[in-house]
Image (cartoon, helix red, strand yellow):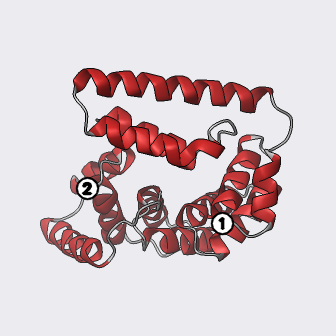
């Protein structure tokens, strides 16, 4: 089951050129696989894995980004703007990646907000700015983006551009860890060894309140 969830993530959010025209069909196959028995489920998983590998080879051997992507992104399709940003990011053209992530994030795309936060945190394609990174991570976290929640915890713990607050850091790590983010689990466990029981209780209380008010949305990560 975890394999199928992972494949759904790859097919929906990772910019493979070959899969792009058939993304909806692939997601339908994965949905049917989740409802099937063990043998059918694994057969469909292997079939989709083959499609992903084939698509990756198409992307690796190809020249520029898919023309249909570019045309759709230029017309304002937020998802194709995200995928185009991811394509440029994979080619280490961070300035172009930032441009497309900004356009997509401006239309409310949650994944693009997270990716833009990463670029600001690392100073890739934009001037390094931890405050802006935290701003974009926060905007993504409000819609349940798990990686953004983990990065907010890291920024809060390290005092990079925002006020250092270990309780807030614990809160973010706790939220992301509750959604199976391994890096967040590691940081959460480390903080539990140095925080007081009162601080841990306070962090968990705020975390549970946040999770109730900001449930993850489809396509948020």
* Front residue of this view, candidates 85 and 123: 85
Give the side of residue 128 with respect to residue 219, left or right.
Answer: right
The residue carrying mark 1 is: 78
Give the side of residue 7 with respect to residue 201, left or right.
Answer: right
Nearest to N terminus: mark 1 or mark 2: 1
Residue at the (67%, 68%) spot, across then down? 104
Tag on residue 178? 2
Residue at the (77%, 44%) spot, across then down? 92
Snapshot quadrant of residue 44: top left
Which residue is at the far right? 63
Residue at the (63%, 70%) spot, across then down? 105
Judge depth for marks 1 and 2 and give the one in front. Answer: 1
Snapshot quadrant of residue 200: bottom left
Q: Where is residue 213 in the image (x, y as percent from the top left)?
A: 29, 79
Q: Position of residue 78 (x, y in %)?
A: 65, 66
Q: Quadrant of the N terminus?
A: top left
Identify the element where label 2 is drawn.
helix
Marker count (numbered): 2
Q: Give yes or no for contact between labels 1 and 2 (Cβ–Cβ under 8 Å).
A: no
Q: Position of residue 82 (x, y in %)?
A: 66, 58
């Amino acid at each position: 089951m975890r394999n199928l969830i992972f494949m759904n993530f790859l097919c929906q959010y990772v910019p493979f050129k070959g899969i792009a025209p058939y993304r909806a069909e692939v997601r339908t196959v994965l949905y049917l696989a989740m409802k099937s028995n063990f043998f059918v489920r694994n057969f469909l998983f292997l079939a989709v894995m083959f499609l992903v590998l084939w698509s990756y080879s198409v992307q690796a051997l190809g020249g520029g980004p898919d023309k249909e992507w570019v045309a759709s992104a230029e017309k304002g399709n937020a998802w194709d703007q995200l995928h185009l940003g991811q394509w440029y990011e994979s080619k280490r053209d961070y300035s172009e990646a930032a441009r497309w992530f900004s356009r997509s994030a401006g239309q409310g795309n949650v994944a693009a907000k997270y990716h833009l936060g990463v670029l600001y945190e690392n100073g890739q394609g934009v001037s390094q700015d931890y405050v802006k990174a935290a701003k974009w991570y926060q905007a993504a976290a409000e819609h349940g983006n798990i990686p953004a929640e983990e990065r907010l915890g890291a920024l809060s713990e390290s005092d990079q551009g925002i006020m250092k607050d270990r309780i807030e850091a614990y809160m973010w790590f706790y939220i992301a860890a509750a959604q199976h983010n391994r890096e967040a689990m590691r940081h959460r466990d480390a903080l539990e060894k140095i925080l007081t029981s009162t601080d841990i209780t306070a962090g968990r209380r705020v975390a549970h309140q946040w999770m109730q008010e900001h449930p993850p949305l489809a396509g948020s990560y």
